[in-house]
Image: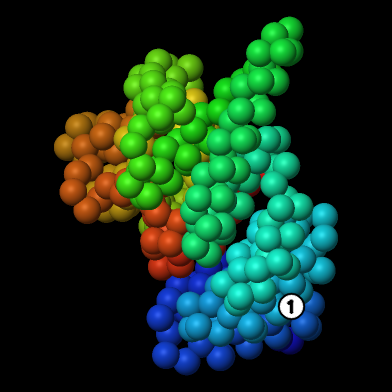
């Protein structure tokens, strides 16, 4: 019986596809599993196609990448915003500007309602439309700030959501303006003030650490084998473990957290640390102290650039790996 295509295997293929001299077998494995209904979790069908599209894009085959991105939309039409944004960006890079702009413009309202939708402006900027991307961010900020001023009696949840939107948009706009070499303006000053308030924001996250303990895939498996009682403290799979960390970092960032990152642990080092401290390696406080003790290459800053290798170590670009895991 043909093997099922798991989320872990999709990520592995994405890693192998980085600068692969012969991406065809990798793409065939992904697309073949979709064609034959062998994707272990149907929710990963569109993602498998987008990973294949990214491999093709890296290889310079934008036309075939566009075909797969379009198919990803058809396969999962209820969760198609990200795939549509990828398709729009590819259309722009292929010189089909009217079609690409129409695709992205249709998604533009998401910038005012979805804190994760800045991938729209990333596609614009990557396709050489940085000024337009900055304009969209500015207009979204204008609209949300006006809405909060006019609706001062909104629920606490609505106010928190608006604050998260303002923070995310202001920071993305600020970063884009720095990339463009533009001077500070009022919204840049707002972004600076929000980031300067990060200590207070992290207090609102129950004093959670700015650096979270992360276990690479082999270490995650070894961790649960060595200390089975930890199964109650960690997600059932490594894929869920890294998704949980990505979401926690996103939440911290939205609340104003700065200098965020992951501490990469190993089972042998945790055991040695606990032994030296005379503590229980399965105790949460011991693991937090172990994470605080890590330095140098064991620490990875978050977030990486969207086109840089993902922080989880998969080798795949962040924008195609853990970044989509934080999107609602």
In the displayed structure image, the side of residue 306 where residue 37 appears, left or right:
right
Which residue appears farthest toward the top when viewing the image?
A: 153
Q: Position of residue 37 (x, y in %)?
A: 79, 77
Q: Position of residue 237 (x, y in %)?
A: 56, 54
Residue closest to the eye, 189 or 209: 189
* Residue at image point 53% right, 68% down: 11
Image quarter of the C terminus: top right
Give the SS element for disc 1.
helix
Q: Position of residue 46 (x, y in %)?
A: 71, 66
Residue position marked by numbered label 1 in the rendering: 34
Disc 1 crowd, CA 10 A, few/some/many (<14, 14-19, 20+): many
Q: Looking at the image, is 310 positioned above or below residue 270?
A: below
* Residue at image point 40% right, 15% down: 200
**Residue 290 picture quarter:** top left
Asked whether residue 194 is in view, the answer is yes
Residue closest to the eye, 136 or 221: 136
Residue closest to the eye, 19 or 30: 19
Q: Looking at the image, is 205 positioned above or below residue 321?
A: above
Q: Looking at the image, is 200 positioned above or below residue 134?
A: above
């Amino acid at each position: 019986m043909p093997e099922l295509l798991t989320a872990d295997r999709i990520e592995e293929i994405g890693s192998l596809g980085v600068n692969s001299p012969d991406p065809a077998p990798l793409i065939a494995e992904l697309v073949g599993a979709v064609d034959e209904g062998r994707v272990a979790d149907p929710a990963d069908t569109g993602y498998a196609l987008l990973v294949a599209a990214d491999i093709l894009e890296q290889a310079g085959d934008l036309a075939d990448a566009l075909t797969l991105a379009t198919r990803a939309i058809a396969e999962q039409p209820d969760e198609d915003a990200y795939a549509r944004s990828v398709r729009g960006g590819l259309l722009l890079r292929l010189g089909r500007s009217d079609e690409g702009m129409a695709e992205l413009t249709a998604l533009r309202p998401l910038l005012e309602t979805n804190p994760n939708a800045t991938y729209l402006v990333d596609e614009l900027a990557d396709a050489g439309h940085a000024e337009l991307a900055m304009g969209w961010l500015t207009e979204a900020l204008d609209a949300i700030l006006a809405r909060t001023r006019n609706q001062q009696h909104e629920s606490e949840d609505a106010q928190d959501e608006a604050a998260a939107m303002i923070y995310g948009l202001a920071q993305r706009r600020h970063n884009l303006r720095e990339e463009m070499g533009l001077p500070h303006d009022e919204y840049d000053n707002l972004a600076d003030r929000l980031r300067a308030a990060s200590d207070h924001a992290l207090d609102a996250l129950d004093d959670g650490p700015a650096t979270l303990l992360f276990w690479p895939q082999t270490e995650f498996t070894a961790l649960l084998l060595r200390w089975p009682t930890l199964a109650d403290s960690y997600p059932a799979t490594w894929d869920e473990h890294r998704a949980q960390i990505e979401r926690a970092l996103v939440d911290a960032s939205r609340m104003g957290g700065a200098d965020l990152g992951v501490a990469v642990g190993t089972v042998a080092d945790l055991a040695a640390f606990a032994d030296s401290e005379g503590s229980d390696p399965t105790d949460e406080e011991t693991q937090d102290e172990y994470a605080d003790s890590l330095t140098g290459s064991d620490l990875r800053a978050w977030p990486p650039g969207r086109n840089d290798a993902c922080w989880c170590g998969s080798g795949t670009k962040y924008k195609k790996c853990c970044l989509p895991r934080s999107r609602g």
